[in-house]
Amino acid sequence: MTLPVIAIPADIRILDNSRWHAVHTQYVNAAVKVAKAIPLLVPALEEGHDIDAVLDRVDGVLISGSASNVHPSLYGREAKESDGPFDPARDATSLPLIRRAIERGIPLFAICRGIQELNVALGGTLASEIQEKPGIWDHRKPQVESRDDMYAIRQAVSVREGSCIARYLGLSGEIQVNSLHRQAIDDAAPRLQVEATAPDGTIEAVSVIDAKGFAVGVQWHPEYWAETDNPSRALFEAFGEAVREYAAARVTEGALLSD
Ligand SMILES: N[C@@H](CCC(=O)NCCCC(=O)O)C(=O)O
């Protein structure tokens, strides 16, 4: 059987003074090596996307992290310069992709910026510069040279008993994760169930209530240590299992339709 295909929406990055559509290799590696799927990078288009044309061809959606922030106008807030950098093309691609994947029951795994997009896509809001709020830790990317140190596992997260994340991890309670973000979920969207929190109360994982299948978001970065860290691996293995199940159902459905 051919490998299932996972859509990963790209960022717009400026390299050599020109615009590129880019996805960081850590997301590609986790999809290939742990989820056992083929990533299909989706260009970030501010307009003209045909979301169903993309989703008709994939078996899962992985929404990656990014240093850019969701534009505040998308959750009813005024944009301040300090809320940037922005990536409107990424926003215009990710948000409809998330909404439509949920409607169609396509497995969805949203990471860091991805959980923030998931929340905004379903009607929630974001808080900026959370480290400046009383009692909130500094969750920002460590200012270090080595990427391994940047993505070092350094923070406790409490996973709720009976949650989807607990099911995928095979455990609930405290796990250790990495942290590289200055924004977080403020008002959780009505359709999201909070599944894990940091000791300072920051929402660290959610699931989509009444989702047809795998539909979760995490604020940390399981992709980075997906091959070596048990909770990271467990999440990508569960996502890969959901994607394979969806792919098999799609093949069966196609066979029935062609009869
Ligand atoms: N921009 C958002 C989301 C942060 C995120 O996705 N971080 C991963 C990328 C880190 C980097 O390459 O800078 C926020 O800051 O909350």
Image (cartoon, rainbow, N blue to C red):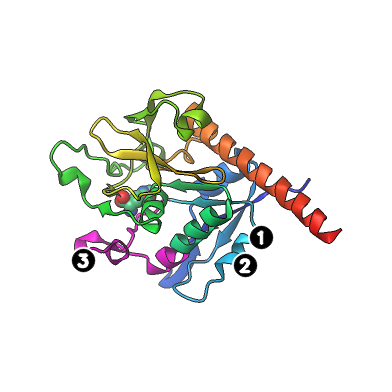
Measured from the top left, where is residue 192 in percent x and y?
39, 45
| Residue 13 is at least partly visible in this image | no
Evaluate if marks 3 and 1 touch, with contact meaning CB atoms under 8 Å apart. no
Give the magenta-colored segment's residue range.
65-93
Task: Tell me which corner region of the image, top left, top right, bottom left or bottom right, holds residue 77.
Answer: bottom left
Measured from the top left, where is residue 78 in percent x and y?
21, 66
Residue 219 part of the magenta segment: no
Q: Which mark is residue 53?
A: 2
Evaluate if marks 2 and 1 touch, with contact meaning CB atoms under 8 Å apart. yes
Measure the alpha-carbon separation of dots 2 and 1. 7 Å
Q: Which residue is mark 1?
A: 57
Q: Which three-letter amino acid code belongs to the residue tagged 3? A: Glu
| Residue 5 is at least partly visible in this image | yes
Residue 77 part of the magenta segment: yes
User: Who is closer to the viewer here, 135 or 68?
Assistant: 135
Q: Residue at x 66, y 47 (%)?
A: 246
Question: Is label 1 in a helix, a strand or a loop?
Answer: loop
Establish if 203 lies above or below 171: below
Q: Residue at x 32, y 34 (%)?
A: 197
Q: Which mark is residue 78?
A: 3
58 to the left or right of 252: left
Q: Quadrant of the C terminus?
A: bottom right
CB of mark 3 near ligand 1 (< 8 Å): no
Q: Residue at x 58, y 35 (%)?
A: 237
Measure the alpha-carbon separation of dots 3 and 2. 33 Å
